Image (cartoon, rainbow, N blue to C red):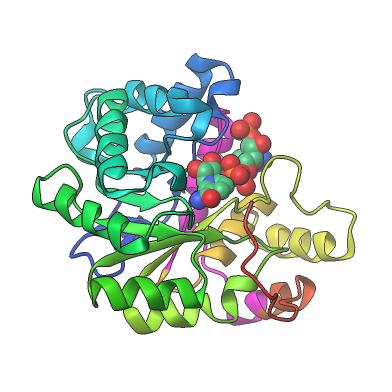
Amino acid sequence: MTHSKQKRKFGCLDLDVAVLGQGTWNVETSDRKEAIKALQKGFDLGMTHVDTAEMYGAGKAEEIVSEAISGRRDEIFLVSKVLPSNASKKGTIAACEKSLARLKTDRLDCYLLHWRGQYKLSDTIEAFEDLKCDGKILSWGVSNFDEDDLDEALAIAGEGKIACNQVLYHLNERAIEHAVIPWCVKHNVAVVGYSPFGSTGGFPKDDSPAGKVLKEVADAHSATVHQIALSFLTRLDILFSIPKAADPKHAADNAAACNLKLSKADIEKLESAFQLGRRPGSLPMI
Ligand SMILES: NC(=O)c1ccc[n+]([C@@H]2O[C@H](COP(=O)([O-])OP(=O)(O)OC[C@H]3O[C@@H](n4cnc5c(N)ncnc54)[C@H](OP(=O)(O)O)[C@@H]3O)[C@@H](O)[C@H]2O)c1
């Protein structure tokens, strides 16, 4: 089975990547077998973009991912992240090598700086470029970067180097629409929205005013509210989303969101129910 319609060009990379990927934060707190089954179910249904990090479960999430991708590495767009506290030039290279060992692979498809920290961005970017030259990563990106951070990264690296910016994006948190999305469109950087359901327990309730609108749109499409959220959050060509599901039923539900097409009227309805709000002083992150 091919899933080409579920993929789109990933920023400046000459590569199509699954629009809906799979997150793995806290995956180690769930039943291990079920969590691996959920990831594999997601892969089977086209969600072949998987997001992990050295931080998640102090490496345990990467180990779970390694089991899930075993025997099918070439199908997967594998992303991991270096912690800011490790993001010196030497530290980034060492952290990447440890992630590769835990993931039992020879390369990451994309390696991200998890958020800005104490090390000079130029040192982290130099390490990313060295890792790329060595074939240990195929591309690199950033996470939780606001417009000014992106300007700084661009000034260091130049155009066509930053593959993506992974940022908080869900129905109740649309801050990236003010400046981050326009910046990324202009510079051809993929926007990967994390915590699309507001993380565990953060999803709009069906009986809230905005939740009722969401439910109405879902009913009109015979879809679930989570599917409508994912469809909304990937409504532009630059957008990707990485829901986390340790339950295989949730993974299947999320994968089916690719088959939805929201109308302009649906989008306007959702945009007015879940207000954009004013631009915050700093970019929100989890
Ligand atoms: N770069 C960063 O700083 C950063 C920060 C936060 C997150 N992330 C990434 O983004 C990923 C996703 O964000 P997240 O883990 O915070 O939370 P999320 O994806 O917003 O929500 C996960 C929660 O939603 C539930 N769920 C998933 N699919 C569902 C469905 N179809 N119906 C009902 N419930 C459903 C999950 O339950 P089950 O697990 O029981 O299936 C889980 O409780 C993370 O796992 C991580 O990879 C990155």
Q: Nearer the viewer, residue 55 or 271?
A: 55
Snapshot quadrant of residue 245: top right
Snapshot quadrant of residue 267: bottom right
The magenta stretch spans residue 252? yes
Residue at 45% x, 48% y is: 84
Judge from the rendering whether residue 145 lies leftward or rightward of residue 222; answer left or right: left
Residue 194 in sight from this viewpoint: yes
Q: Which residues are magenta?
A: 239-267
Above or below: residue 46 compared with residue 170: above
Q: Nearer the viewer, residue 286 or 83?
A: 83
Residue at 51% x, 38% y is: 252
Above or below: residue 279 compared with residue 163: below
Judge from the rendering whether residue 138 lies leftward or rightward of residue 230; answer left or right: left
Residue 188 in sight from this viewpoint: no
Q: Nearer the viewer, residue 134 or 263?
A: 134
Snapshot quadrant of residue 95: top left
Q: Quadrant of ligand 1?
A: top right
The magenta stretch spans residue 209? no
Residue at 40% x, 80% y is: 185
Q: In the image, residue 51 lies at what x, y percent?
A: 42, 43
Residue at 49% x, 36% y is: 24
Q: In the image, residue 82 lies at what x, y percent?
A: 39, 44
Q: In the image, residue 218 lies at what x, y percent?
A: 69, 59
Judge from the rendering whether residue 32 lies leftward or rightward of residue 279; answer left or right: left
Q: In the image, residue 49 lies at what x, y percent?
A: 36, 46
Above or below: residue 170 compared with residue 24: below
Judge from the rendering whether residue 210 lies leftward or rightward of residue 252; answer left or right: right
Q: Quadrant of the N terminus?
A: top left
Q: Nearer the viewer, residue 5 or 58?
A: 58
